[in-house]
Image: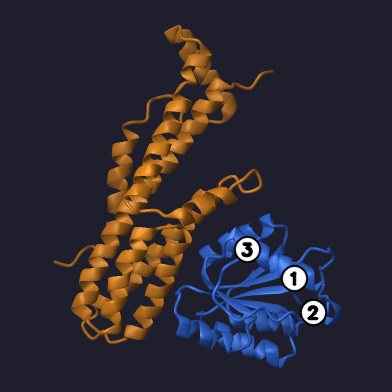
Amino acid sequence: MEREKTDIFSRESQRESGRKGKQLSGRGEGLEPQVAEETARESSAKTGLPLWMLGLGADRLRADMNRLLALLFHQGVLDEQFLQLQQLQDETSPNFVSEVVNIYFHESEKLLRNLRGLLMDREFSDYKKMGIHLNQFMGSSSSIGAKRVRNVCVAFRAASEQNNRAGCLRALELVEHEYCYLKNKLHELFQLEQQRVLAAGVRYPIQN
Amino acid sequence: MLLLHIGKPFNLRKEILGKKMRGKGSSSSKISTLIVDDDPLTRRIHKVLLTKVGLETQAVENGKEAVDLYRSGASFDLILMDLEMPIMDGPKATKELRAMGVQSMIVGVTARDLEVEKQMFMASGLDDCYVKPLTTDTVTALVEKLNKDN
């Protein structure tokens, strides 16, 4: 049965986003710092907890982020290139990592759709064109440290060089699976970062 | 700072900064770099990386745009040239630039670490060739070479 190729990436992401979305409390995620401070003060008034205690969440969230990153490195999903990207992020490029990863997602999904489109064509024979798409995808994956995605592309490339269409299709399934896993985990990481930034703002509210 | 890489020894061109033309808008003493790559991800990463070590950057999406820039009078101290690009690839663009008399440092960047591919690319007139993405160490070493030459 043909996979609904336009749905695979959005379907997987929506499933994960929905699950994670339920974990978000009503603490005003995504609010401006001033509004977040007002929300925090309201929470403090309602609960009787001091403001500083509400901000303890930032430490927990940072620990969660570190644990997730450690897991992704341990699993071989990410490599040191991801750390290089983090080191390039500073006050002049404060959202550099998420920008780069979003570019990767956007470009990769185009490339993966192109690859699937080529292989699903019954009269497909342009392995050279497929090789170009694949090389670009592998290069991009290396650029963000997506080690496991890149590694599973090796088998794909081997099948492509042998003009083995069935092998290419099997390899593409594996690549898509690894890509979806990576995308979900990075979304989870960025959501934790957003929550951490908000919680850190609560701990150190803006003083008038 | 040590740099380990695969490639022939860097061939210093002492006349690079002395003889080159300065295009419009080039007003600072910073090293100017042209990023030639069809991949927006690579362009973004290299732009931030190069800016972080103090270089001026401009980016184009294929070899023809790079050649056209030079034909219009622009010049750069360093060109980062991707191997595979539509319209005009890295080797062809490099050959054209060298045929025009361009003596800027041209460094190839490839997605694959294949010796045969690198040698073919080097033969088009590169000063060196690396697997992308470049690292801070690599860029720092390139800047040191350019400064030494200056």
Residue with the mark numbered 1: B146
Disc 3 and disc 2: Cα gap in Å?
24 Å
**Residue type pointed to by label 1:** Leu
Numbered circle sitting on residue B2 = 3
Q: Residues within 10 Å of mark 1 (few under 14, many from 20)?
A: many
Chain A, colour shown = orange
The numbered mark 2 sits on a residue in which chain? B
Mark 2 crowdedness (10 Å alpha carbons): few <14, some 14-19, many ≥20: some
Coloured how?
by chain
Image coordinates for residue A156, horizontal then vertical, percent: 29, 73
Q: Where is mark 2, residue-wise? A: B16
Q: Do the residues labelled 2 and 1 touch (CB within 8 Å)?
A: yes
**Chain B representation colour:** blue
> In the rendered image, which quarter is residue B67 located in?
bottom right
Query: Do the residues bearing badges 1 and 3 touch, measured as CB atoms within 8 Å?
Result: no
Residue A168 location (% of width, % of height): 24, 75
Q: How far apart are marks 2 and 1 (CA)?
A: 9 Å
Q: Who is closer to the viewer here, A187 or B30?
A: B30
When the figure is inspected, residue A164 is found, relative to residue A34, above or below; the finding is below
Q: Residue furthest left?
A: A1
